[in-house]
Image (cartoon, grey):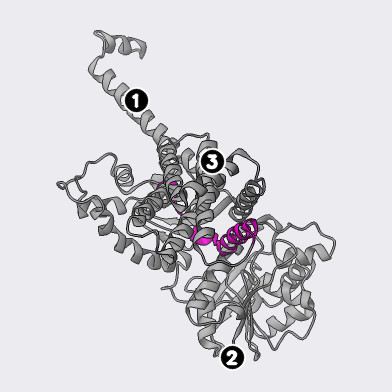
Amino acid sequence: MALYTQEQIDKANQTNLEEFLQQKGERLKKTGSESVLIYKDSTGEHDSISVRRNRWYDHKNMRGGYPLKFMQEFYGMNFRTAMKELLHGEEPGLGRKKNNENEKSVRQPEKAAVQENQERIACPSEKSEFILPEKDSNMKRLFAYLLQTRFLSKDVVKSFVAQKILYQEKEHGNIVFVGKDKEGTPKSACKKSTAEHTKGFRMTVAGSDCRYGFCWRGESSKLYVFEAAIDLMSFITLRNDDWKPDSFLALDGLSPKPLLQFLEEQKNIHEIFFCLDYDAAGIEACDKLKDILIEKGYEAEKVKREYPLYKDWNEQLKAEHGVEAILPQSHPKKTAYHAAVRKLGILNANTESPYMKWRKQEYEKSGIHFYLEQIKRYFKQAEKLVKKKEADTKPLLASLLRMADLSVCLMCEVKENDNLPEQTRYQTTIQKLEKAYKPYLDKAKMDRRIQEMKEEMERLKTIEVQEQPSLFVWAKNMADMAMRAIIYVETEYLQELERRNTFATQKVEEHRAASYSKNLEQEEPEGQQEQMELMMGG
């Protein structure tokens, strides 16, 4: 297969992503020196992707890179299709080589770009001189907003004001939240408007070092972590106890950097409570941050989660004051996973159904070879259906559910005898899969999912049926991949198809327009120019 040259890859990655997305009809909102992409997924409408020239960063999923990776991540394109789009149809410039060689050549630069983009976009002015906004002579607007609109305790607000990490700026009357290091030196600041007509306005002060968040440093071993400063103070207000011995940190988003910096400085912390928002982004961030801490040696049982009764702690505080509050929001993928587990449980409970009778009879005839052959069969069905890219997903879901069911059955048969009844063993197994599921690790598009299953099918050829531990791991992997594919179909697959179809439609329209224009130039009727001149009064 012909390859793209490194020069072509570099050219594709130099594409101005802001202009490219505007030409494709995507919604972009200009915010200072960068743009924010407005998009929808299974969890609703989002503005978490920052774009600046040829760089992008997804704050929600904590990943980023250059245009080539964006096309693969956001539109689900493979490498070659993404290259062709960014280069406007330009063909590869090298001869035939291995299929994946181009992908390898771009993987390392893209990986390095994630950290660079996170620093340049998530904390864009890090190299500028950091100067705190000038303090106002009074704090009337600050107290009015935080006490009357946000219902914070006056004593709590005064405590943070006394630490000189909370004040009102002079120029616009915004609230300023300051992040200091262990020595008390200001390192970062964020401004938030108190005006109703600018609801939601917040801005990081130029030159801020985003490793330092708004925080309270206590002497105890406990740390409570929040997304925003107001959530932090809301939680303390709700506690209504002697809170000062504990530590509290606002991430100003979901980045792990302020948390890791805080733990580096505060060696007294041994127990961590994540108090993030009760929504999809907060649920994913809790899983991700906990995994990061466990990798760094923290004990899993010492990393816990505190759930607000509403979407966040300030919403809970509002509700306690009789104000309408936003309810907690479950993660769509976790909800879909639970629904799939329930379907499989119901399927196996009905032992008299034709499917269950057939499954039992065939297993008694052929043993685990039956499960293996049927998993292969349903995978091939799913693979064919994905290639068709049809909007009717019922046949695809049916194939994936059968794959998951048979893989779980295989897991139950090859693992050690636990003396549990068959149905109980099955239910326990799928519930363990559900408990282990983490949406932040489940971001692949459908083509990639099918490819991973295909690779696992190839790995089966190296496993002997008698090797029960290896066979159990293989069956678990297949069950997990099938379940995650089911979740993707239920939540995001149709949006992936829609994005692809949008691109395909635009390409057809561009081709038609180009052909029409070319035909007009080549086939202009005799006398057409004279007629145009007469009509224009020439």
Q: Is residue 411 magenta?
A: no
Tell me residue 399's x, y (percent): 50, 42
**Real-space Cα separation, disc 2 to disc 3, in angstroms:** 52 Å
Looking at this view, name the residue that lies furthest to the front.
365
The quadrant in which the N terminus is found is top left
Tell me residue 446's x, y (percent): 44, 47
Tell me residue 322's x, y (percent): 85, 61
Magenta segment range?
421-447
**Real-space Cα separation, disc 2 to disc 1, in angstroms:** 67 Å
Mark 2: few/some/many CA within 10 Å (<14, 14-19, 20+): some
For the residue marked with disc 3, what is the amino acid?
Ala
- Read off the residue under disc 1: 512
From the viewer's perspective, is 369 left or right of 277? left
For the residue marked with disc 1, what is the amino acid?
Arg
For label 1, the SS is helix
Magenta stretch, main secondary structure class: helix
Question: Which of these two is toward me, 176 or 311?
Answer: 311
- Read off the residue under disc 2: 268
Labels 2 and 3: the sequence-earlier one: 2
- Residue 135 disc label: none
- Read off the residue under disc 3: 398
Q: Is residue 434 magenta?
A: yes
Name the mark nearer the viewer: 3 or 1. 3
Number of numbered discs? 3
